[in-house]
Image (cartoon, rainbow, N blue to C red):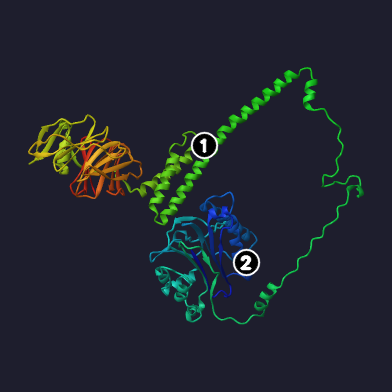
Amino acid sequence: MQIFELHFNPKKEEKFFDSFVYEPESSYEKKLGSLYIAGELKNSLPSNSKLLNSLAQVIKKNYYTLSISSAEKALSHASKKANEFLAEQVKKENVDWLGNLNFAVFCLNNYNITFTKTGDIKILLLRGGQIVDAGANLDLEEIEPYPLKIFFNVVSGRLVENDKVIIATKEVFEFLKQRNVLNKIAKTENLDHKNIKQILPPSLFSKGEGTDISGICLINVLSSEPQKRTGPIFFQNKTKFSLSKFISPIFRKIPVPKIPKIKMPKIPLEKLKIKPGTILRKKEIKIPVKKSVPIVERFKKHKNTKKIGLIVLLIIIIFLGFYLFKARPEKGEKELKVILEQAQEKLDQAENLLIFGNEQEANDMLKQAWTDLFSFPGETSLTQEALLLKQNIENTLKEINKLEYIENPEVAAELNPEEQLKNKEKLYSLSGTNIFFSSSIYIYRENNWQKKNIDPPFSNYSFSSYFSNLYFLNKENCQIMKYSYKGGLEWGSPATWLSDPGTECDARSIAIDGSVWILNGNKSILRYYNGELKDEITLDFFPFPEDMVIKTKADTPYIYLLEAKNKRIVIIEKTGKIVKQFQSDKFDNLIDFDISNNGETIYMLNDFAIYKISI
C-alpha cells in the first residue's frame, strides 16, 4: 500500500487545506484500520486556519473508540461528533466556514473501505483503467440548518488489489481531468514516486494556468506491499525568503533543560497545629467511635426473633421475585432492540454496497437481515417497527433478485372444465411438446393425441422425456430408470440410468436437455451427464425456494422453476445466476407448466386457464 499526499500552491490567501493520515497504533485500533482525511476551507478568515486540524482531531479521537468494533459504526460515530463540533462553532458565531468547507474522510481496513464527505471535494475509485466518482451519491445541494448536519451518510465497499482511491479538491480535480492526468494515473499499473514525477512534473503548477491552481490530492494505492508514506509532496511557485521560517527550525533543535522535581519533606501530623473544625483530606486521623451493638445481636435479644426473621425473609423473596419478573421482559425488549438495530445496520450497509455494484454481497447481507427478522415476536412494542423494516428489506431483495409482479397475465387459452382429461394435453400441444405422461403416454401427431398405457417403475416419481426417451426419477432415493424409444408407440424395457447419485440427494423433480437435472430439495440442482455427477448449483435467490418443479430445453441457456406456493415462475442461468422472476395473484392454483423449444415463452396451467409469459 502506498500513500501520496500532493499539495498544490498551499500559500494562497483566504484558502486553507491539509491532509491527515492516521495509522492504528494499538491492537484494538488495527481492527478499525487506517484513517485518511483531506480538507479544504475557502473564503475564510485567518482565525479559522486551525479549523481543519481541529476537525480532523475530533474525527480521529471518536473514530478510534474502544466501544466500537466496526469501521462503519466508528465512522458514523465520528461523523456525529464532527457535526456536534461544527454546531458548537456556529453557537460561538464562527460561521464563515459554512458553505466553504470541503472535507472527506475514508477508512481502510484490509480491502474494506468506508467513507463520508461534505462539500464539492471528490472521492474517486480507479480500477482497471476506469474512473468512478464513488462519492457522487453523497453530494448534497444544501446543509440542514439546525440541528446542524454537515456529514450525512457513510458509504462502505470492497476494494481489490491495485485499486486506487483519490481524494481531490474540486479545483485540482478539474485541472487534472482537463490535462488527462487522472487517466494516466488510472492506467499506470505500478504507481510510485517516479511515476508521480513523470505524470505531474513540478512545472505543471509553476507555469501558466497551473500557478492559479491551489488545492490537495490524496492518492492511496492498494497493493500487497507494506504501507509506504513519505510525507506531503508540495507543488508550488517560488516564494520570498522568510527569516522567521529560517530561524524557527533552529530554535526547535535547541535542547530545553529539564527542571528537577523538588521533593517536599513529610511532616508528622503530631507536629502540625490544626485548629478545631479543620477538615483533613487525608485519612490520617482515626476518630474513636462509640461501639454500637450489631443488628444481628439486637435481633437475638428480641423475644420474637424468629417471627421477625421470617417476615424479613418473606419481604426479600417478594422483592426478589418482583425484580426478576420485571427484569425478564426488559431484557427481552433489549435483545429485540439489538436485533432491529443489527438488521437496520445490514440494510444500510447493503444499500452502500449497491452503490459500488457489489450486488451479491448486498444480497447475502439482506437475506441474513430478513432471516433475523423472520421469527420476530408478534406482540411487542417493537413489532410494528420490525414489520416496516422487514418490508423495506424485502422490497430491496426483490429488486436485486429481479422479481416482477404481473397484475394481469396474458391468457393463452380457457379450458372447458368438462374436458379435464385433456387439460394437460392441450397445455403441451400449445407449447409444442409432443410427449406427456400421466399414467399413460400421449404423443401428439398431426393434431391428434395417440395414447399408450405404461406402468411407471416407482410409486413416488417425477417424469421427463428427451428425444422421446422416457426418464423416471425415484423421489425416494434419486434412482433414475430410462425407457429407450423404439418408434411408433413402442419403448424398450426399463434400464437403470442412475443408481448412485454420488451425493446426498433429496429428489423433487427432473428435467433433461442432454444433461439430467435433478432438483435437490430446496437448496440446489444436481447436473448429471452419462450417469456421473458433474455440477451442483446452489439455489441462491429470494424469496427462498419451496416445493419447486424444474424444466429446461436443450436450445435454451436457462432453467425454469415453478413454485405454486409463492405463485411464481423463476428463471435462472444454467450456472445458477438469477435472470428473472414473475409473480401474480392470478397464479392461485398452478398445476403444471412448460416452455417453448426456444425458451422464449412460458405456458402455465392454472385451474382451467393457460397463462402465457413472453420473455
Which mark sits nearer the N-terminus, 2 or 1?
2
Residue 27 appears in the rendering:
yes
Residue 557 picture location, percent across and down: 24, 50
Helix, strand or loop at label 1? It is loop
Q: As drawn, is 286 to the left or to the right of 46?
A: right
Q: Quadrant of residue 88?
A: bottom right
Q: As drawn, is 261 to the left or to the right of 130?
A: right
Which residue bears the numbered disc 1? 381
CA separation in Å, label 2 and label 1? 48 Å
Q: Residue at x 88, y 48 (%)?
A: 269
Mark in the foreground, 2 or 1: 2
Residue 194 picture location, percent across and down: 47, 74
Helix, strand or loop at label 2? It is loop
Label 2: how many Cα within 10 Å (few below 14, some 14–19, many 20+): few
312 up-or-down from 224: above or below = above
294 up-or-down from 252: above or below = above
Q: Which mark is residue 395?
A: none
For badge 2, the amino acid type reads Lys
